[in-house]
Image: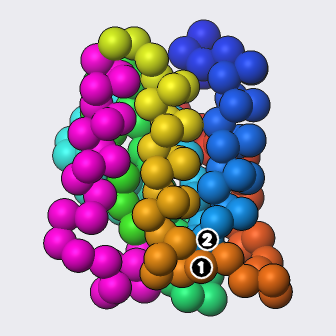
Amino acid sequence: MSAFLSKEDQNRIVKAIEEAELNTSGEVRVHLESKCKGDAVQRAVFVFNFLKMYKTRERNGVLIYLAYKSRKFAIIGDTGINEKVPEGFWNRIREHMGEAFSKGAFADGICNAIRESGESLKAYFPYRSDDVNEQPNEISFGD
């Protein structure tokens, strides 16, 4: 996996998660794997459940999923988010990710998506002083 993202890029992504979570009680995670055989959104839902991301008090987890060799990616939110946000909430962030990825700027695309997610979610799930980090900030890896 380190051939795809350098250790420096991985550290940038973790730092972006930490910073985004200062704006929102939402929990952001990034999962990377090389291949996705089917639909990226379906795979992201599977990974979301595998990582037990539904285990947040407000059901406000966000998963940014990327299968880099398959050139597939998705961003999904838990039920607590999807009940509150408008239809197509993730589309703009996904489009921005796609633009960065098409230029080969994978770490930038992921970091920007994390920041946009945190900024967008703060209206629905503002950060609270008693907020607890309910999900790890480290990148998870498949394959």
Residue 62: mark in rendering: none
Taking 135 as reference, is 143 above or below it? above
Q: Amino acid at mark 2?
A: Thr
Q: Nearer the viewer, residue 47 or 101?
A: 101
Question: As drawn, is 12 to the left or to the right of 86?
Answer: right
The secondary element bearing badge 2 is classed as: loop
Residue 24: mark in rendering: 2
Crowding at dot 1, Cα within 10 Å, few <14 / some 14-19 / many 20+, comes out as some
Taking 78 as reference, is 128 above or below it? below
| Dots 2, 1 in contact, CB < 8 A | yes
Is any part of residue 96 visible from this angle? Answer: yes
N-terminal of the pair, mark 2 or mark 1, is 2
The secondary element bearing badge 1 is classed as: loop
What residue appears at the point 53 percent right and 48 percent down from the top-left corner?
A: 114
Q: Nearer the viewer, residue 4 or 62?
A: 62
What residue appears at the point 17 percent right and 72 percent down from the top-left corner?
A: 87
Tag 1 residue: 126
